Image: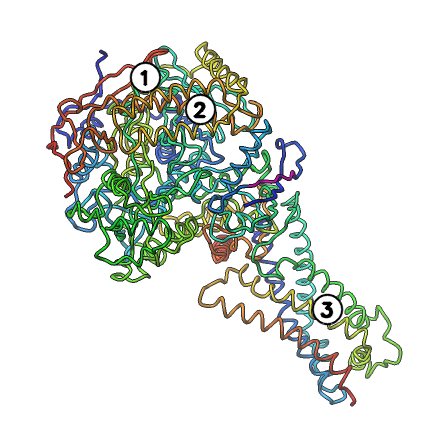
Amino acid sequence: MKFKLKIWRQENAQAKGKFVTYELDNVSDDCSFLEMLDQLNETLVDKFDKPVCFDHDCREGICGMCSLYINGRPHGNDSGITTCQLHMRRFKDGDTLVVEPWRAKAFPVIKDLVVDRTAFDKIIQEGGYVSVNTGGIPDANAIPIKKVDSDLAMDAAQCIGCGACVAACKNASAMLFVSAKVSHLALLPQGSLEAKERVDNMVSKMDELGFGYCSNTGACEAECPKEIKISNIARLNREFFVSKLG
Amino acid sequence: MLNSSIGKKLLMALAGLFLCVFLVVHLGINLCLLRDDGGEWFRAAAGFMSSNKIIKVFEVFLFGGLILHIIYGIFIEIKNRISRPISYNKTYASQTSYFSKYMIHTGMIIFAFLGLHLINFYFVKLGWTPAPQGIVAVEDKHDFYNMAINLFQNPVYSFVYIGFMIFLGFHLHHAFQSAFQTLGVNHTKYNTLIKATGTIYSIAIALGFSVIPVYFLFFWGK
Amino acid sequence: MAQIESKIPKGPVAEKWTLYKDGQNLVNPANKRKLDVIVVGTGLAGASAAASLGEMGFNVKIYCYQDSPRRAHSIAAQGGINAAKNYPNDGDSVHRLFYDTIKGGDYRAREANVHRLAEVSNSIIDQCVAQGVPFAREYGGLLDNRSFGGAQVSRTFYARGQTGQQLLLGAYSALSRQIKKGTVEMFNRTEMLDLVIVDGKARGIITRDLVTGKIERHAAHAVVIATGGYGNVFFLSTNAMGSNGSAAIQVYRKGAYFANPCFTQIHPTCIPVHGESQSKLTLMSESLRNDGRIWVPKKKEDAEQIRKGLLKPTAIKEEDRDYYLERRYPAFGNLVPRDVASRAAKERCDAGFGVGATGLAVYLDFATSIQRLGKKVIEERYGNLFQMYEKIVDENPYETPMMIYPAIHYTMGGIWVDYELMTNIPGLYAIGECNFSDHGANRLGASALMQGLADGYFVLPYTIQNYLANEIRTPRIQKSMQEFESAEKSVKERIDKLMSIKGKHSVDFYHKKLGKIMWDKVGMGRTKESLTTAIAEIKALSVEFWKDVRVTGTKDELNPELEKALRVADFLELGELMAMDALNREESCGGHFREEHQTEDGEAKRNDIDFMYAALWQYKEGKAAELFKEPLVYEVVEVKQRNYK
């Protein structure tokens, strides 16, 4: 397969970036999008050019490190996957692919397609945990948990922190990310004791870091590689009201 | 609470839902125009609305809510634009509810209509603008019945009016379900119900208001 | 020969850990604040250790090369985590878990360590549940278990197919809590490039800030490496792209023993290789073997037809299928340990019965289970795995059997540690996959997560105090010391050297070449001849690399080519070490299969008389590494030939 790639290149955080167009031929339809970029980079190295920088690690859709906004969609034109799981057979031979970094004030570009997502870590540090120390814990079966609740918590806990929700949202809102963690812990008895402080602190951190406001467009849900539902956002809202009013 | 993003949105949603209720009342009164009774029902309804003490209190809330909804809407839009200082080259190909992306635009269009609407009716009531020519006050009250009929017989006004109502429908289509989501009402059992109600509501409002000019343009007096 | 001091406590195996804890030195709370600990790596072991040490009051600094500690590759573990809870009431016990792990490791692990691992396994589950890890539950609200390869009881706790993710996020949340409290300082996008030793003790590390390229010094009273395994030596593996053996090689170069480097695990259920541009292999959880049946066609001509795409697997009649694991190992069937399953697959493919376009694949069939349990149950158990498979291969595994093939997955070998998880360099610890301790020659499924968390939550935080208790009078280590300066200088020189070569071939070119040598000659089947050739080829490749590698860009920026070059340089050293160790070990055991040493029916043949030891390699500059031996003494477990028949 053959592709025309229009890729965002930016030297560093301070530099002004621009789109650069590359042509790439002999791409196997079995290879993943990132393997296609590897192939492009090989050709760049051949020419002593700097390869395109992009974040990636596990390449099996779970670490959440890969990003890329491809033709207007985070993680490209397939649903329920990350960019590393996107295969070239999803495109047509000869397609032009526009590849951009996640765009958000809270995710500044570091270089080329690499952005800084430490904002997510900072939000988690505000309360995305149950405050227990190691050791001195009662038996795991001491607290029975309804299977439905546990399953719902697991649905939310699957978030991989990739930031596609922020990238997809026209408002660059982080509500889906925050709501996934708040929901995961609010649904379990272990997490419910600190529910009030957690939701307060995480939401105010989210606001402080410069993410936009949710306007319920549902783009986050449509693009989330783990298909996390916006019902979690409604739960976050509920948790928030309860915490403020209670 | 109001310092937070979620708090502000809660207020937006509550104000919006309040406006939704108001629209139903307003539509109810307007539909009285269709009754061929020389404006008896319409006048009675309008009279009740302008004289009842409780309604007066609600009027304050209504304007408060409206202003709040608009100011917060604009504030949030600005905030959201700041949140993405560099925009995408290829934008938003994600599957979303279509109208949700244009809430600020449909909102501003409705706001423009509201200006026109207020000049035409509410300002007359307040005495800020004179009543159109040929409209005589009835029993010291402005004759909104004939004012409305006159306006609707003007095809330009009517088509503009219908156009605006369509945008109102677009706005409401996302707004209704969005308000529930913001309030935290989202449950697999009821989501379809909420969405369907929202769709029916938005169509009913847009259609309901549009029926009136259509009637006066094409069917009235024939 | 130096005496290998493994510091195994006295007393019966089952009481050693209790006795150790009763007698060890502790650090009082006021002194903990004065002590700094460096932890490298934020996987299960690193994150849990840093969080626990932070909670205790030590000053911790933690490092990862990714943008966030939550990315560490522990996150990719799918199947589950073992514990001897015996919730299903099927006769499990600490002793049985201990026994299974020793046997699964083909009697090449240290008894005392493994017993301790089994002992703390239950606390791990308690700890994780308290953190809010959403393990699978029964309708009654209690935790669910499933069975896994190499065990006859159901002792594996799981969270759908994402157990590693949930456990890592649990450790990450505990770590985040400490970062917020200020007891742990986080350095992300930072890679360790060298260890600093002062007066014989590990006192710090040299790092590179991957964004700015700045070389920095970090000092502490003790250094813990938790940097995972070195499977990427093979280029294609199930490891993350960034997973590397560099920290291990760096400490090895500074004198730490590297133990059993040849013990690598080949995972039987991976998605087969598709082509040249492939960058990594994807694993399908071993839990699939619970309900999937592995087979190849009985007739060679059927296999040929399938390879050509002329025949569909569903068209092969039941009697024409060879369920070779069920045939060869009736007792364990499809649930034999990983090494056995992998070799059996290779054996069938080598014999010409392989399927898929390349002939390097076997079927994993769910038809029987779907019939027995219904599609819904199968979907509940493996839904996300099936979906992942379909995305990659473009085939629906509910309708046609999956294709699988073994791939490099885990490295049992690693930095040698004593009972306290300390290396032979005082103050340097190695935990998780990067040490060699608990899995012997083969790791059982769902034991990696157990070991990582055992080391991080429940072992290291105790044992490190035994060392730190003697360090309370040592003031904060000064980064201006000459040792830091010279370590920094040598790191800078290494980088400058790589940047200045400006040769013909990219880093990946060499990495792929190394990978091919390793897979072909140091892979599933090894011979004296293949290993000797491999050593020569790797040596030559290494020379070529240092003469002709091309690293584009500069050293003062985010430069993935430079990062890769540094790692591949280390892999070249590791590859050679692995081959040397494999050559030395004249026996077949666990993941190490020497074709010269097999029984008549192709099973691994151990040599307990000559090789019942851990092989410890010590770096000698400019010379071949020197071999030391730690004899393995089995007091409790009776050493037998493994038998899964």
Chain that bears disc 1:
C
Q: Is residue C145 visible?
A: no
Q: Type of residue at label 2?
A: Met
Q: Foreground mark, 3 or 2?
A: 2
Chain that bears disc 3:
B
Answer above or below: position of C81 versus C259.
below
Q: Check residue C367 in the rendering and tell me which mark sits there, or answer none.
A: none
Q: Going by the image, does A91 lie left or right of C444?
A: right
| Residue at 61% over, 63% down | B175
- Mark 3 → mark 2, Cα distance in angstroms: 63 Å
* Residue A40 spot, x, y in % from top left: 55, 36
Quadrant of image for the C terminus of chain B: bottom right
The stretch in magenta equals A20-25
Disc 1: which residue: C425
Disc 2: which residue: C192
Q: Label 3, secondary structure: give it.
A: helix
Disc 3: which residue: B164
Q: Residues within 10 Å of mark 1 (few under 14, many from 20)?
A: some
* Residue A127 spot, x, y in % from top left: 45, 43
- Mark 1 → mark 3, Cα distance in angstroms: 78 Å
Answer above or below: position of C539 versus B62.
above
